[in-house]
Image (cartoon, rainbow, N blue to C red):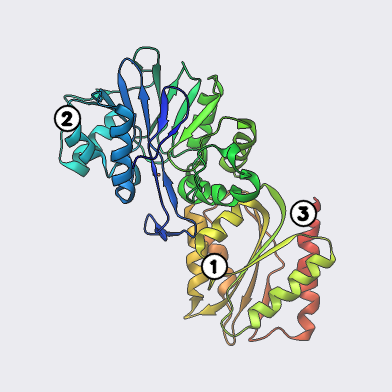
Amino acid sequence: MYCVRKVTDDVTWVGGCDRRISIFEGVYRLSRGMAYNAYVITDEKTVLVDTVDHAVSEAFLENVEHVLGGRKLDYIIVQHMEPDHSSTLGEVMLRYPEARIVCSKKAAGMIGQFFGRDVTGTALLAEEGTVLDTGRHKLTFVMAPMVHWPEVMVTYDAAEKLLFSADAFGTFGAPDGALFADEVDFFRDYLDRARSYYCNIVGKYGPQVQTLLKKAAGLDIQTICPLHGFVWRKDLGAILEKYLKWSAYEPEDRGVVIAYASVYGGTKNACEVLACRLRELGVRVVMYDVSVTPEETVVAASFRWSHLVFAAPTYNGGVFIRMDETLRDIAAHGLRGRTVAFIENGSWAPTSAKQMREILAPCRDMTFLENTVTVRSRPAEAQREELYALADALKASLEA
Ligand code: FEO
């Protein structure tokens, strides 16, 4: 049975939700599923805006067929070729062979790579500002390279003042029947998932996101239709404000993330003392044990908060593996501009602080506090003052 929702009279959501997925892109652990959005525009010409992941292909294909209502499909706009959106494109091309592909030149090349189909001679190869006139709708294509792949473009529908935004403004999670962000308490219930999605999927490409936001600022946008999560038709300023902060690597909140690895509890003990002292000083603290917390959670927290403390044992001469992975993930996502401190542990040759700092060295505009605390096996009572001094230094930095 079809399951569609109207965005406007002419624009219909035809996507689907996968609540069995536990790992997205083979990396990101999901607890509340994933939504894959696609849209059909019914005008003098009919247009499908993107396709979906194969996991929801059956619902999607039925939805498209229903919305077309027996009409032929004239155009398939391919904004992004990552297979969470394009894996059903091959099937759509088989079902609607007369539909003309509209995509960037790079996307056309990728269609060849993924599907073995050379569309370069038949597709409408969109460039910056190319307009597709479908009758009432004039669809203008805006190139958005590296948001999140190089072939990405977004599509502005002047008739509806609507932006099809590809991955931008997406969210992890499968909404519970809601299509519009204003149908839920987004900032209470979904902001964490939206932040995690942004930071982990496009966090590395902040400058490219800023470029797209500048282009979007020149358009009269009243509705945003992303390829994941919710459609925005109210309070666009609130989510735009988040995107401006995230893409500029500005922290949303001032406070301290303490992410620790602790094999036998000594490092954790030091972190607990530090956290309690920070609380006594009136500082907000969030703690994660990286042995059980997925990297993507710590990555998102590192984007959110202003100050970060990483604590880990020295292990096989390096940094304990789970912390090593977490820090490399943060560095790979290009975090910038945070204040960072370290606690290291080592029963005979502690070197993990130096190595943790080296992992984060490529991150730009970081401030490293010099109050590193070195634990040998377990914190000695005499080290309480060192931990308190670190707490004081963090507080001073927070108030600077
Ligand atoms: Fe949702 Fe970059 O794909």
Q: SS at mark 3?
A: helix
Q: Nearer the viewer, residue 143 or 328?
A: 143
| Residue 398 numbered tag | 3
Residue found at x 29% / y 48%: 54
Q: How far is mark 2 from mark 3, CA to CA?
A: 60 Å
Please, what is the three-letter code of the amino acid marked with disc 2?
A: Pro
Q: Is residue 89 above or below residue 297?
A: above
Please, what is the three-letter code of the amino acid marked with disc 1?
A: Thr
Number of residues whose C-alpha sits closer than 10 Å to that of mark 1, classed few (under 14), some (14–19) or many (20 or more): some
| Residue 293 numbered tag | 1
Q: Is residue 253 above or below residue 28?
A: above
| Callout in the foreground (2, 3) | 2
The residue labelled by disc 2 is 97
Q: Residue furthest top?
A: 135
Query: How far from the left and from the top, in percent, is residue 50?
Result: 34, 34
Q: Earlier in the sequence, mark 2 or mark 3?
A: 2
Q: Nearer the viewer, residue 25 or 298?
A: 25
Q: SS at mark 1?
A: loop
Q: SS at mark 2?
A: loop
Query: How far from the left and from the top, in percent, is residue 1?
Result: 33, 42
The answer to whether residue 349 is visible is yes
Number of residues whose C-alpha sits closer than 10 Å to that of mark 2, classed few (under 14), some (14–19) or many (20 or more): few
